[in-house]
């Protein structure tokens, strides 16, 4: 799994217990996962369909740096299934795990549309000139 995005925990990210607010973390994850799905399905029209059980394993505090890892585990006809792991960058301790986040590619009318993708693609490969 690649941990592409890092976040520095600031005062506005905290809950009344002075630890990272769970809602803020879920917002970051949804954004990160949406961008991952957009890149993999090569369409800006992706919607979050389903998020599985969320396990808050540990917390983070102000000043901590966390990193968000996302990976595709399954390509359906119109959907893509992702898995997510968030960890403390310094200690590598897991903060949250989400087994499944499912995005669906939709057309202009918001209806599911086939994406034709079957495996993870890397932008560097897409940019390679045809031989
Ligand atoms: C190039 C760069 C541009 C950059 C550009 C800037 C981008 C800047 C970032 C913006 C990022 C925005 C990201 C927005 C992220 C949101 O906020 S989306 C908002 C929250 N989500 C929604 O509002 C979705 C509401 N739901 C719906 O509209 C409909 O349910 C959907 C998603 C269109 C699906 O419709 P449906 O009739 O239920 O579909 P159905 O045909 O039954 O199933 C479709 C697929 O979903 C799967 N599915 C259905 N139900 C379930 C379920 N309960 N569990 C699991 N899977 C299911 C099916 O298995 C199927 O998968 P495939 O087998 O085809 O692979």
Image: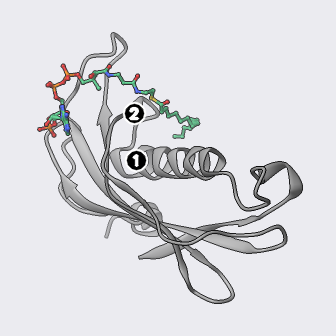
- Residue 82 is situated, as x and y percent measured from the top left of the image, at 33, 56
In the rendered image of this protein, does residue 97 appear above or below residue 17? below
**Residue drawn where x is 76% and y is 69% of the image:** 61
Q: What residue sits 31% from the left and 32% below the top?
A: 105
Quadrant assignment, res 6: bottom right
Badge 1 is on which residue?
37
Cα distance in 3D space between marks 1 and 2: 7 Å
Q: Indicate if the residue with disc 1 has its beta carbon within 8 Å of ligand 1.
A: yes
Residue at horizontal 41 percent and vertical 76 percent from the top: 1
Measured from the top left, where is residue 98 in percent x and y? 38, 59
The residue wearing badge 2 is 46
Label 1 close to label 2 by CB (< 8 Å): yes
* CA neighbours of label 2 inside 10 A, class few (<14), some (14 to 19), many (20+): many
Q: Could you say whether the residue bearing mark 2 is in a helix, strand or loop?
A: strand
Q: Residue furthest left?
A: 77
The residue that appears at 74% across and 74% down in the rendered structure is 65
**42 with respect to 34 (left or right):** left
Task: Identify whether 40 is placed above or below 125.
Answer: above
Q: Quadrant of residue 50?
A: top left
Quadrant field for ligand 1:
top left
* Residue 64 falls in image quadrant: bottom right
């Amino acid at each position: 799994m690649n941990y592409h995005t890092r976040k520095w925990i600031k005062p506005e990210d905290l809950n009344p217990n002075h630890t990272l607010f769970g809602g803020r973390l879920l917002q970051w994850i949804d954004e990160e996962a949406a961008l991952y799905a957009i890149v993999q399905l090569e369409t800006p029209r992706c919607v979050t369909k389903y998020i599985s059980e969320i396990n808050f394993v540990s917390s983070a505090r102000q000043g901590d740096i966390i990193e968000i890892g996302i990976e595709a585990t399954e390509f359906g006809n119109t959907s893509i299934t992702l898995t997510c792991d968030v960890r403390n960058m310094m200690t590598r301790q897991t903060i949250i795990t989400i087994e499944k986040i499912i995005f669906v590619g939709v057309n202009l009318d918001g209806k599911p549309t086939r994406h034709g993708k079957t495996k993870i693609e890397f932008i560097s490969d897409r940019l390679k000139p045809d031989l």
